[in-house]
Amino acid sequence: MDYSDKVIGYHTTSPGNPSPYLAPGKELSDAEQKYLNTCRKWYSEDGGYAHILGTKPQTIAYSLHDSPAGLAAFILEKWYLWTSPTNGNLLRHFSKEELMANVSIYWLTQTINSSNRYYYEGRHTIWPGQNDISQIPIGVSLNATQANERPPKEYVARLFPNILSWEELNKGGHFVTSEEPQLVAENIRAFFKKLR
């Protein structure tokens, strides 16, 4: 098959993905229900930042653009919480220079607001619908988060039925591409080989 004119998706997973389209008369599996319950719990306990970014992104943007310490705290908290596992020490995975380079990019370019617009746009976009089902081939790499914290394959397949690759990395967290770059690169190469 020739997919040269298509956008091909390759995703790593994290909590908070939207609910898939359900055709009339269809129901979610037990695994999907468990996953959505975990997402709701995560959002209510840890998703405060996502709520404000999804509803009032400009409010926090001004404060983050005004304070380099505030910006660093905002960003580095996510790196600390979403790197797996830190065991209390984020520097086991990243150097201070790497972390501060990440913060500096947002500070020097003043782009934290545009970066955070994803939350607002996602909250105000009505989807998915029946016409939003994508036939584009995708590959999924699952990081080391607990199974109930990531979508089951049948959940993803409702919107992306053409899953060519579903790989358990068993390493890394939200920033798996920075934590395990070689492993992710190998999985991406293996995915694209399937399209040849």
Image: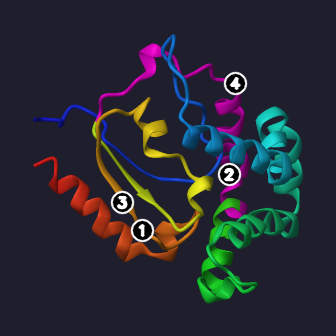
**What is the tally of numbered marks visible in this picture?**
4
Q: Which residues are magenta?
A: 107-136
Q: Nearer the viewer, mark 3 or mark 2?
A: 3
**Residue 139 or 34: which is nearer the viewer?**
34
Instruction: Write the residue at 47% across / 67% down.
Output: 177
Say which label, 2 or 4, has the lower sequence index. Answer: 2
Reply above or below: 147 against 94. above
In front: 147, or 99?
147
Q: Residues within 10 Å of mark 1 (few under 14, many from 20)?
A: some
Q: Are marks 3 and 1 in contact (CB under 8 Å)?
A: yes
Compute the Cα span from label 4 to label 1.
Answer: 32 Å
The residue wearing badge 2 is 111
Badge 4 crowding class, 10 Å Cα cut-off, few under 14, some 14 to 19, many 20 or more, is few
- CA–CA distance between discs 3 and 1? 6 Å
Give 87 or 55, whichever is nearer the viewer.
Answer: 87
Above-or-below relation of 158 to 49: above
In the foreground, 72 or 172: 172
Earlier residue among tags 4 and 1: 4
Q: Secondary structure at mark 3?
A: strand
Where does the N terminus fall, quadrant-wise? Answer: top left
Instruction: For marks 4 and 3, give the CA distance.
Output: 31 Å
Going by the numbered disc 4, the residue's amino acid type is His
Q: Which residue in the structure is indicated by mark 1? A: 169
> Residue 79 occupies which quadrant of the picture?
bottom right
